[in-house]
Amino acid sequence: MTTQTLTPFTPDRARIEALSQQHSSEPRAVLEARLAAFEKFERFPVPGERSQGWRRTRLDGIDLSPVEPERSVCEIRLSAADADRGIVVQTLEAAALTGAPALANIDTGHSIEHFSALAQALWISGGAIRIPAGAHVAEPIVVDWKAGTYPRLDIYVGKGARVAILENHALSGRLTAGIVDIHVDDDASLTYVHAQNAPRDAVVFSHQRARIGRNAKLITLNFAMGGKLSRADVEVRLEGRGAESDMLGLIFGEDDQQFGFQTLQGHHAPDTRSDLLYKSALDDRSHSSYTGVISIGHDAPRSEAYQANRNLLLSDGARADTEPKLEILIDDVARCTHGATVGPIDEEQMFYLESRGIEPGAATKIIAEGFFQDVFAKAGDDRLVAPLRDLVAPHIGRLGAH
């Protein structure tokens, strides 16, 4: 009996050029972006337990080596009523032919730069959504990933358009690293939900980067409860006067799951506003780490920014690390503040519920549900958050059995 040893996948320049040549019509600029990203990948070290932003992350038994690129396939669903509004849904290689500037963008995430660069070098297909100017999309557009190791989605919302998008990630496989590019043009509005519920043994990375135009608004909600190790960099650039961003996040951790989020609220125009609320509820031996940066540039007078990270520890073995940061390069700021909390369930809340005849397990469940409800309400669209409630409900219900 012989034992077959699998050869590790090692990306190189020749493989990337061959991958690009599989799509004979791929623009030269896209290949150049792939190769530039690969050069970054080679420069960036594989993160370790001593790396900035990765301290206290347990990496024993976690394989962070690259995986062979596989074609990314997603199903993008929109209502029949909205199909006639001129919305364009296509594969990413088709979008490249009609002009997708984000595909030439090689900016990498701050905490997952190694994996972000890898994903930008090795993506094969993916999805693209184009909302035409002035279109008001009645029903949420739903994106379900079916396959792929380096999934990539490109979203463009035209001037004055209104749309809501729910993106579901539940891909199996040892490691996935995805990229999401979002552009919200002047006077437009987008509510975007990224729901990650991968299998328990998966390693999941996501790099989301958004640009917001004049008087436009973007609401993002990142929801994470799957995977063995899950990390995301979420970056928003407010580039037009009066641009607004609301950044929301929810994590539910159990067993020995580990989650990491790094966010950037980048103000680059006058009279811009950003507000952030990220929450994690952690049970068993789960761990979350959060780093949030508010950056107000020289070109962003009268900006207003707020950042809050709240962590609820549901067991003695759970832990959370939080690190808010401010980078203010101008004196003329309307408001810029941040706050963070880490702690167990409030004893006064427990006492209040128990004094009304509610046993401790049920009281814990009620408090956890209320902890999440605050973020769900801020998202402002129950059609988007109802599926998330359904996903997390059985896990919160288990708290009552403790």
Image: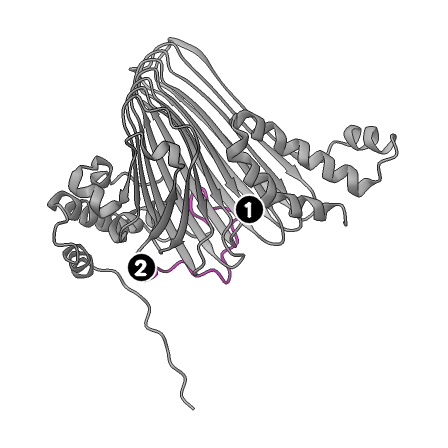
- Provide residue 106's location: percent of width, then percent of height: 24, 41
Query: Which amino acid, by three-letter code, is at mark 2?
Result: Glu
Residue 122 within the magenta-colored segment of the rendering: no
Q: Residue at x 37, y 60 (%)?
A: 65
- Provide residue 73's location: percent of width, then percent of height: 34, 53
Location of the N terminus by quadrant is: bottom left
The disc at residue 70 is 2
- Provide residue 175's location: percent of width, then percent of height: 41, 57
The disc at residue 225 is 1
User: Is 305 above or below relative to 263?
Assistant: above
Q: Relative to 341, is 191 on the left or the right? A: left
The disc at residue 238 is none
Asked if residue 168 can be seen in this view, the reply is yes
Magenta segment's dominant SS is: loop
User: Is 222 above or below relative to 135?
Assistant: below
Q: Relative to 213, is 80 on the left or the right? A: right
Query: Which amino acid, by three-letter code, is at mark 1?
Result: Met
Q: Residue at x 30, y 33 (%)?
A: 87
Q: Count neighbours of disc 2 (C-alpha within 10 A) and say few if under 14, some if 14 to 19, many if 20 or more.
A: some
Q: Relative to 145, is 17 on the left or the right? A: left
The segment highlighted magenta reads 50-68
- Provide residue 186's location: percent of width, then percent of height: 29, 19
Q: Residue at x 21, y 45 (%)?
A: 94
